[in-house]
Image (tube, rainbow, N blue to C red):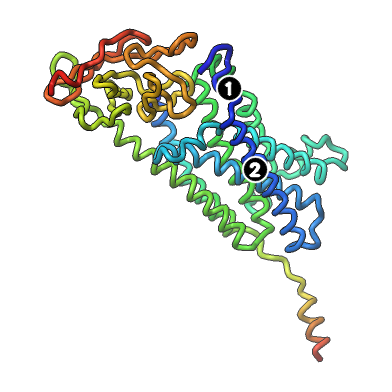
Amino acid sequence: MIRSIRKRHKFIWLVLAVLLPILFVVSIVFRHSEPTNQNIPAINKKINE
Amino acid sequence: MSESYLAVSWNRQKKIYDAIVGGGVLLYLALFLGLGSVSHPTATIETLLIRGFGTASILLLHIVLIIGPLCRLSPRFLPLLYNRRHLGVTTFFLGLVHAVLVVIQFHSFGDLNPIVSILANNGRFASIPDFPFQILGLVALIILFLMAVTSHDFWLNNLSAPVWKTLHTLVYAAYALLIGHVALGVLQAETNPLFAGSLGLGIVLVVGLHLWAAFKETETDTEKLLIETGFIEACEVDEIPENRACIVTVSGERVAIFKYDGKISAVSNVCQHQNGPLGEGKIIDGCITCPWHGFQYAPETGASPPPFTEKVPTFNVKVENGKVFVDKTPNAPGTHVEPANVADWK
């Protein structure tokens, strides 16, 4: 009874040990790049000139 | 121990435990709001509250999840297990406040019902950066709700420990959903490596400790060899500390063999309350005492002292040449078994 529960726990955590790192890494790798305002360098350049 | 479903009374330890949990949560929220308003001066109080309650909830869930394996690895952590259910319920309430604030902030001012809005306002399931992560949080919150409402011993008694434990295994699904909720949600906007690093560390800690404890348990489950007449050589008498037990696996289940007052008795390792490991407990006032919540059983009969009614199976034991032999067939719960006398072989 308890042994089967322990086996199930072990299986669940083996699966999560594979899935969670994949989910974490994929979510970081494929996130949007930070939006940048293309006008700001131009404005800065004008100010400096 | 229980009659009328009052397994653990509202004692001093529980009050201290809950005071520490409540104080810790309030301190965390105060620090989060204080530091957040300084580091993010443009953030609104609503945003800070949403993130404060959300992070408090997932932080507490990590703590809840590591208590189990920590206790399997070292008995020093057992006091944390004593009232873990209150931590779980607190996790749910923190998540609930987070969800209510999100609904008010983002889903209350449109034409759609707020819950429908959560489910229908974003259908980009194929996109990683635009994934509808709020649905993951909603499903996780429903699971945490189910666990919170069934956390009382009333449900444990009515559902039976194996069914109750299986139901509460859903917390692992809730954890995976919440990792997805955070990774596909706030981490898509917050690019500070501190946030991603904290979540990654949490995953490594929780998964690593669970696997470590699981593999350690596998060693204990190695079957002992069957000796003649249905008895199994379990361990040496000298291996068992006084008023403690050694645990062996017999016919697929664990047996706790206790040494006390020059005697040896064997009972099932499984406490009838929450299936706690009796063999990791000790003899207190003549009774085997479960290390999780203090349920007690007489070592000779496996029965709780009156007026309590819990019973665990007993095993016939004998001592020969300094070795303990256990019958592979358990007796019915509560069956009296004459203890083996340690002095017989000395």
Where residue B35 sits in the image (x, y, percent)? Answer: 72, 59
Task: List the residue tagged with mark 1.
Answer: B9
Can residue B40 be seen in the rendering of this structure?
yes
User: From the image, which quarter does the C terminus of chain B lie in?
Assistant: top left
Amino acid type, callout 1: Ser
- Specify the label residue B57 is tagged with: 2
Is B153 left or right of B275, judged from the image as shown?
A: right
Can residue A13 be seen in the rendering of this structure?
no
Is A15 left or right of B344, judged from the image as shown?
A: right
Q: Residue at x 50, y 17 (%)?
A: B160
Dot 1: within a 10 Å radius of its alpha carbon, few (fewer than 14), some, or many (20 or more) residues?
few
Q: Residue at x 81, y 37 (%)?
A: B114
Do callouts 2 and 1 point to residues on the same chain?
A: yes
Q: Closer to the observer: label 2 or label 1? A: 1
On screen, residue B143 above or below A43: above
Chain under label 2?
B
Where residue B193 sits in the image (x, y, percent)? Answer: 60, 62
Dot 2: within a 10 Å radius of its alpha carbon, few (fewer than 14), some, or many (20 or more) residues?
many
- Specify the label residue B60 is tagged with: none
Q: Residue at x 71, y 48 (%)?
A: B29
Where residue B80 sits in the image (x, y, percent)? Answer: 51, 37
Q: Nearer the viewer, residue B176 or B258?
A: B258
